[in-house]
Amino acid sequence: MAATCGFCTQLTADLAANAHSLLRFDASVLLVDTDGTRLLGLPLAEPAQQHLTRLGQRAAHQGTPTGVLLAPNRPARVLTGFDEVSHALVALSGADAQATIIEAPTSCSVNVAAQPVDAVLTIRVNGTTRLGIAVRGREPRQITETATSGILDDGYTPVTLTVECPGTFYLLFRGGELLTRARTPMALQQALDAVLASYASYASPERGRIPLLCGVAVHDGGHAVLFPRTWMSDLVKRARQLEQAGWRLRPEPYTTLQTAPATGTLRLPAAAGSRQGSPTVAAVLTEPPQVGVPPTRTRLLASIVNWIARPATTDATHTLATALQPLPVHTGTWQEALTHLTHHRPTEHDPSSRHIPPGSASNLDG
């Protein structure tokens, strides 16, 4: 471990959140860093702990976090990176590591995970895949338990979602990404339902559907725009402003698209309980390149195709690339996109005619 390693900080937070499962470990876990060694799980005799600490220190040159997995009558196995170490901890707890969702942390997720949690509830996506929801506070825990039938599992479960209520809003995070600021328990439950349905859909995809790692805003008029995932938290904080202009942000971690059979246009599957039907994707909002000359439209479209969730089939990638060809692509910051969406209401009959005016952002659909 290393104090300056964000992956290590997330791993430490996951271990703390899973304190109850560590008490049942049929294993010892040593965390070795520059400040010393912490022992979790089964106690160790002092000579063994000293020897294993030296082994951990020698493994540090491979990067952090790095693990060395030791078992009787088996060769030592070196584990490199957050993903491998987390999978090993899940397996050591007796749970199914291959059926457990483990998402790589970001600097923002480390900030969200830093504070103590009251519990990690384990839920089953599609009845099999394990997903961990950390809760802070009695009421968020009660709402989450009711909405998800989540339980305290004996197995180690890394945190994927976090629910808390630090003020007047119920907050739902995926890692460090704010998915919703719900005003009521019902709104939080609806967001949780949508998020879990998205994970279930991704785990068992329907034929012809294409999952993207991007955000989506749906207008009351029945059309939608795609935007970079990095804008999600900032736009969620301004959801009321967007709602007043007729836009709704969908909290799903995966934006699933499909093409209309007759026209080939991209559409979103209808949200559960929605009367809108399947919204049509009318435009893509994205960030301009940080450096260098402005990209061509071809390069912009290639970068948007890269939003497709992996693993992706060749057919899905080609279908997405073809369906994006006629769409307007606008570049700018999330602030400029917010101004455009809230001050320039699109016409219902021709949503593709919308343009972000010069000076606000560049229109690159030519």
Image (cartoon, rainbow, N blue to C red):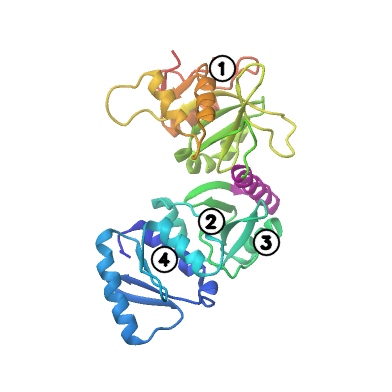
Tell me the amino acid under the disc marked 2: Gln
Give the x, y percent position of residue 196: 63, 49
* 327 or 203: nearer the viewer: 203
Three-letter residue code for mark 4: Thr
Boundaries of the magenta span: 181-203
Mark 1 crowd level (few <14, some 14–19, many ≥20, 10 Å Cα):
some
SS for tag 2? helix
Of 281 and 245, nearer the camera is: 281
Query: Is 156 within the magenta?
Result: no
Q: Which mark is residue 352?
A: 1
**Kind of residue at disc 1:** Ser
Q: Which residue is mark 2?
A: 98
Q: Which percent across, then down, holds residue 229?
A: 48, 39
Q: How many marks?
A: 4
Task: Kindly indicate whether the residue at mark 3 contacts the one at mark 1 (C-beta within 8 angstroms).
Answer: no
Q: Earlier in the sequence, mark 4 or mark 1?
A: 4
